[in-house]
Amino acid sequence: MTPELPPPDPEEPPRRVESLRRELLAILFLYASLAVLPFLIGMAFAP
Amino acid sequence: MAAALSSAAVKRTATLVHAWLVLDFFGESRRTGGGGSTLTTTIFAQAFLALVIAALLYPETPPVPFAAANLTLSTLLIGIGALGDVQQQQRRLADAVLLGPAPLRPRDVVLARAAHGAFYVCLLTIGMALPPAILFGWLARAPATVPLYLLLACLCAGIAVGVLAVLLRLCRRLCGSGRTALLAGTLKAALLAFGVVGFALGLRELDRGAAAMPIGELGVWLLPPFHAARFLAAPAAGWPHGALVVGAGAGLLLLAMLVGERESSRPERRGRDRLLQLLLRALLHRGPLLGLGAFLGAMLYRSAGFRARVLPLLGVPAAMAFLALQDATATVRGRQLFLGMVLQFPAIYLPFLIAFLPRADQPDTEWVFRHSPAADVPLARRAAFVALTTHVLLPVYGLGLLTMLLCGVGAGFAGAAAVFSLGAAVLAARVQVRALEQLPFTQTTDADAGKDLGSPFASAILLSLLAAGFALAPPALQTGLAALAAAGAGLLLVQAGRSKPA
């Protein structure tokens, strides 16, 4: 029988669970923004 | 059967790559107890910087200089980042423990390392390369060059990381991991100082061709980003440049395999008492103060973390001064004023150096002093003042004096300016060590070194005014001020070695 975990300390804020998937998704979202902004700049100031 | 084995090998490789990526993203925050990913923050910051630089250069800059400048920026920052991790030694030791008893074939480990390295470099590089790639597509009126730009950016970054990795492997094989960590910190400072300052100066000369760059035409031809840019502008005609970049990458891979991962088994020799350490001993005499001072003097040079943080601070003004001294059009007065201001930078940066002092490279270093009742913070402040003077300020100003003389600055002004600036820095150090609240090199988290940013700003303004006043004074007065500063510094040092702590 697995022992129960102790209850969380009410004074300590809940720690955000690490997630590699979440970080990679955030980076993909950044890439999407980085693609849109220069595209608009390039179009606006095209030589 | 073969398919099942192959699938198992892929899973093993993927598990290793996943574990290493988790350490890359969350290792630092786990160590310091913070939250979030430090790597994601770095990617965001670098990508934003690349977007700003690319947008500033667009659309006046021609395609080849535009691509070369942006590829150089991404390659430089990725290279600096590859040197910046002082935890690399701990990671390598942890890998040896993880992989040693694991049921993995050597080729699985090699494949995992290659996959992890390639993914990591591409992840960082694409963030920096995407904005200039799209703008280059508009500039060259060729949208098909966008994926080619990204590929070449990853290749150039990979070459930079590869060159540094091979260099460090060679050093580790010949000199051991301790000296290699110190070399990595020094290289980082040099790249940050000369690379970033040279890049900024080169941006002004983009339209004037390769010969106008700070590193000269030969230096430009040795850079992979230059050849990548030539290939991008005209892929059909510029294929030799593309082939050169690919060939450099392949050659580097071969060299890395030849050098291997072996480490020197030569035992680390005990350091001899050098001149600076002898000077420190002469000032601190005996007892706990001498013990703490000698410990500080050794750690200031042997701590890879401290070196990696401090050298860039000192390297940037050094590079600015060196590159400015090459400018033949400056007047004598203007050059003296500029040099006088730059010589105050070490004193202006002292609060940040002092803030870095409590940080240790290894955990639980505090135990060294837990059994020493005489080692307290007031004693540490006196020891830090003397150690910073003998091991940081004296060598920095000595090198500054030598550089000025080699670059043709008059011996009278160079000597007086160096001595005056050293004296002012020693006086500033005596005041600023009061911000030290913990014993040096004993804490594993970043010390809270001062919420008060007013004091460093005030001292920066005061030192700048002193420097300007000194530079504009007649030569006889400059000599007098330098003598006064030297006498004052000497008195403070002697007093620190003798008096009881406040």
Image (spheres, coloured by chain):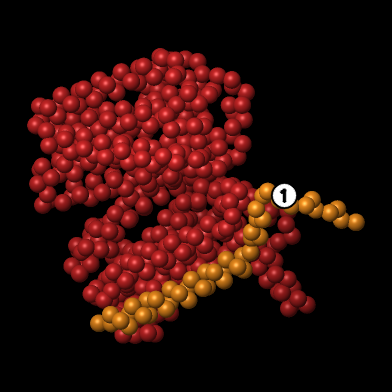
Q: How many marks?
A: 1
> Compared with residue B128, is residue B428 higher up or lower down, i.e. above or below?
above
- Who is closer to the viewer here, B448 or B439? B448
**Quadrant, the C terminus of chain B:** top left
Colour chain A is painted in: orange
Residue B398 showing in the rendered view:
no
The location of residue B393, given as percent across then percent down, is: 33, 32
**Quadrant, the N terminus of chain B:** bottom right
**What residue would you read off at disc 1?**
A9
Q: Residue lying farthest right?
A: A1
> Compared with residue B365, is residue A46 higher up or lower down, i.e. above or below?
below
> Left of B48 or right of it: where is B19?
right
User: Image point 11% across, 33% down: which residue?
Assistant: B473
SS class, disc 1: loop
Chain label for disc 1: A
The location of residue B72, given as percent across then percent down, is: 34, 64
The location of residue B208, given as percent across then percent down, is: 18, 67
> Left of B41 or right of it: where is B499?
left
- Who is closer to the viewer here, B467 or B297? B467
Q: Quadrant of residue B453?
A: top left
User: Image point 46% across, 70% down: which residue?
Assistant: B126
User: Image point 26% across, 49% down: which residue?
Assistant: B320
Colour chain B is painted in: red
- The residue carrying pointer 1 sits among few (fewer than 14), some (14 to 19) or many (20 or more) residues within 10 Å by Cα, namely few
The location of residue B57, given as percent across then percent down, is: 27, 70
> Left of B125 or right of it: where is B14?
right
Looking at the picture, which amino acid does disc 1 mark? Asp
Q: Quadrant of residue A45?
A: bottom left
User: Image point 56% across, 59% down: which residue?
Assistant: B37
